[in-house]
Image (cartoon, helix red, strand yellow):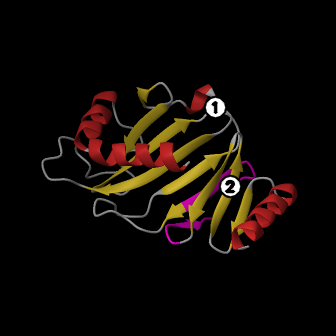
Amino acid sequence: MRYHNKLIFSFLGVLLCPSVVSAADGLSLVVPGKAIELSLDDWAKAKDEMSFAKNYEEKRMSSSHKFGRMVTVYLIPMSDDRRLGLKISDNEYLEFFIVNPGFITAQTRLDKGGYWVLCRETFFKKSGLPVDVSAYKPFLKENENRLLWQFYQAEVDETRYLLNSRF
């Protein structure tokens, strides 16, 4: 019966508000071709600045993160101007920058066709890091991005897996 009620609630939510449904046991987001279900134990709904983008913050952080991951789901197709940074696969783009000196911020973009997903996360500095991260740098050179990708590949791959499997 509980499952039946959840289906009715989700269906009514899609009719009334086709993008985001908040159920008692999770968050649901309807995107072209699928419904995304997020656990309230793992994710919090963050403030949406735009009607075409929905923001979520991961509650549980890995030991490599300074803050929880922020994921934005854009309810529109990815435009060419959003294909920034290193192209790491046919539909994935990665760039690093320094917002908080001493920490490394990564943005991973994933083109899902009818919508796209952006994840922003900030990592603690690893020892032996080959890139100077002591000052604010909104843009890094391509070789610096490649070095950071090599240094943080396991963390980036974890994010790629999350974006491909959950979103």
Residue lying at 49% horizontally and 42% vertically, measured from the top left: 164
The residue pinned by badge 1 equals 113
| Chain part drawn in magenta | 41-56
Which quadrant holds the N terminus?
Answer: bottom right
Three-letter amino acid code of the residue under disc 1: Gly
Three-letter amino acid code of the residue under disc 2: Leu
- The label on residue 146 is none
User: Of helix, strand and loop, which one carries label 1?
Assistant: loop
Q: Which residue is farthest front?
A: 1
Number of residues whose C-alpha sits closer than 10 Å to that of mark 1, classed few (under 14), some (14–19) or many (20 or more): few
Residue 68 lies left or right of residue 44; in this view the side is left
Q: In this view, does 78 lie above or below 164?
A: above
Q: Residue 48: x percent and y percent?
A: 67, 59
User: Of helix, strand and loop, which one carries label 2?
Assistant: strand
Which one is in front, 98 or 74? Answer: 74
Number of residues whose C-alpha sits closer than 10 Å to that of mark 2, classed few (under 14), some (14–19) or many (20 or more): many
Q: Quadrant of residue 17?
A: bottom right
Q: Residue 118: x percent and y percent?
A: 53, 45
Residue 157 visible in rendering: yes
Residue 48 visible in rendering: no
Residue 75 lies left or right of residue 40; in this view the side is right
The residue pinned by badge 2 equals 29
Residue lying at 22% horizontally and 42% vertically, measured from the top left: 151
